[in-house]
Image (spheres, rainbow, N blue to C red):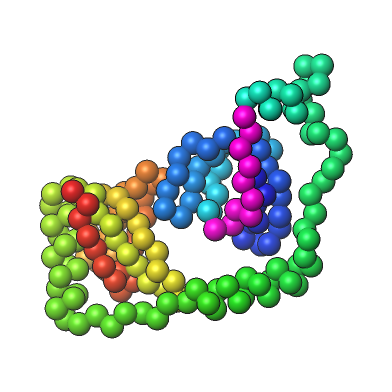
Amino acid sequence: MMYMAANGAISRRRIKVLQVGEVSFRAYCYMRQSNRTFTIENVLALVPVFEREKDYLMKVNGDIKDRGNIKWTAMMLPEHIAQLRDWQAEDDKVERPDLTDWDLDAIREEIELAHKRECNAWVQTWKSGKTIKYFGTIEKIDLHNKSIILSDPFGDETIKWMDIISVQSAD
């Protein structure tokens, strides 16, 4: 896998995918020798390694080999990558939907219903021009902090009420 970190650094990694979510996935990273979480949109290239090919390409006399000393380098200058990221971020921006009082009441009712039924729900948020969908069980409605606690396979997420633009029960 070719992966670009949040700071723009590009790395080549061998991974074994463990779990896949909406915007990220968990995988064992052979480079770091630990389980890691990767953002799907930062994956630049992904190539499967099949058992027969892996044995042929990666083993020489019982030793693991890096197929030579070939190192991956970026085909663009860092300034180009930064400019492309800025353009993409500008293109991907979504305006915040105008929610009426009726919409806000419907969201509140759906949150309360999903919390009481302890069922999975899709929660969509808007922040800084981006919409993000979360999936999980609403564990707690925090009146003091005006937020909900959503439990998903990767852990708990605290979501502020003012960021929520839609909620839909999955069960």
The residue positioned farthest toward the right in the image shown: 69
Is residue 98 at least partly visible in the picture?
A: yes
Q: Is residue 86 magenta?
A: no
Q: Residue at x 49, y 36 (%)?
A: 18
| Vertical relation: 69 (above or below) 169 | above
The x, y position of residue 17, in whole percent, is 53, 38
Q: Residue at x 42, y 77 (%)?
A: 94
Q: Relative to 18, is 76 on the left or the right? A: right
**Which of the image's four quarters has the N terminus?**
top right
Q: Residue at x 45, y 40 (%)?
A: 19
Out of 122 and 114, give the one closest to the viewer: 122
| Vertical relation: 80 (above or below) 98 | above
| Vertical relation: 47 (above or below) 145 | above
Q: Quadrant of residue 9?
A: bottom right
The x, y position of residue 40, in whole percent, is 53, 53
Q: Relative to 119, is 61 on the left or the right? A: right
Q: Quadrant of residue 153?
A: top left
The x, y position of residue 56, in whole percent, is 74, 24
Q: Relative to 129, is 124 on the left or the right? A: left
Magenta region: which residues? Answer: 41-50
Q: Residue at x 44, y 71 (%)?
A: 130
Is residue 145 at least partly visible in the picture?
A: no
Query: How many numbered circles does the render carry?
Result: 0
The residue positioned farthest toward the top in the image shown: 61
The x, y position of residue 121, in whole percent, is 24, 54
